[in-house]
Image (cartoon, rainbow, N blue to C red):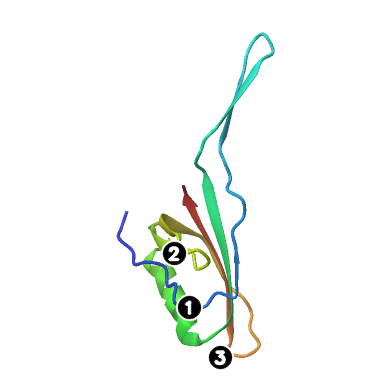
Amino acid sequence: MANVSAYPHTIGVAKLVKPPMEYPQVRYEYDDGGVDVNVSPCGLQRFILTYEGLSSTDAQTILDHYDEAKGKTHTFDFTNPRDSVLYSGVSYESLDVQDHVKSWSLNLNVVLRVYV
C-alpha cells in the first residue's frame, strides 16, 4: 500500500459517530445438535464524520486527501478527535459532498473504516 499522509484532523468536525464494531462470526454446528460460535476479538470499526459550514479551503483539503488516498485504495492514519486514539490502516468507505446553498459554506459526509 502507498504511504498516504494522515487524515486532516485539524479541520473541525461538526458531528462524529462511532457505530459499534462489527465482529466476524464463525458458527460450528455439530451432528449432535451442539453449536460453537467463534467471535473474533477484532473487527471492522467505522467512523462517520459530518462537516458543516466548511470553507472552500478546508473542503478542498479533505477532497485532496481523498484523491491522495485514491478513494478506498490506500490507507492512512486517523486520530479520533474525541479521545486522541490513533488508528492506523484506515481507508475511506465513502465521501459525499452535499448540496449547499451558499458557495462559501460547504457540507461533507465522510465514512472511514479500519479493521482493529
Q: State the CA–CA distance, disc 3 to disc 2.
A: 27 Å
The crowd level at tag 1 (other Cα within 10 Å; few <14, some 14-19, many 20+) is: few
Q: Look at 59% across and 75% down and name the residue there.
A: 14
Local secondary structure at mark 3: loop
Confirm or deny contact between disc 1 and disc 3 (CB under 8 A): no
Confirm or deny contact between disc 3 and disc 2 (CB under 8 A): no
Q: Amino acid at mark 2?
A: Thr
Q: Which quarter of the picture shows residue 35? A: top right
Q: State the CA–CA distance, disc 1 to disc 3.
A: 15 Å
Find disc 3 in the rendering and name its residue: 104
Residue depth check, mark 1 versus mark 3: number of the one nearer the observer: 1
Please determine whether, in this image, residue 70 is positioned above or below residue 53: above
Q: Earlier in the sequence, mark 1 or mark 2?
A: 1
Q: Which mark is residue 29?
A: none
Nearest the viewer among 109 and 47 is 47
Nearest the viewer among 84 and 59 is 84
Find disc 1 in the rendering and name its residue: 11
Q: Look at 58% across and 45% down and name the residue there.
A: 22
Q: Residue 104: x percent and y percent?
A: 56, 91
Q: Amino acid at mark 1?
A: Ile
Residue depth check, mark 1 versus mark 2: number of the one nearer the observer: 2
Find disc 2 in the rendering and name its residue: 79
Q: Residue 60: x percent and y percent?
A: 45, 80
The crowd level at tag 3 (other Cα within 10 Å; few <14, some 14-19, many 20+) is: few
Q: Earlier in the sequence, mark 3 or mark 2?
A: 2
Local secondary structure at mark 2: strand
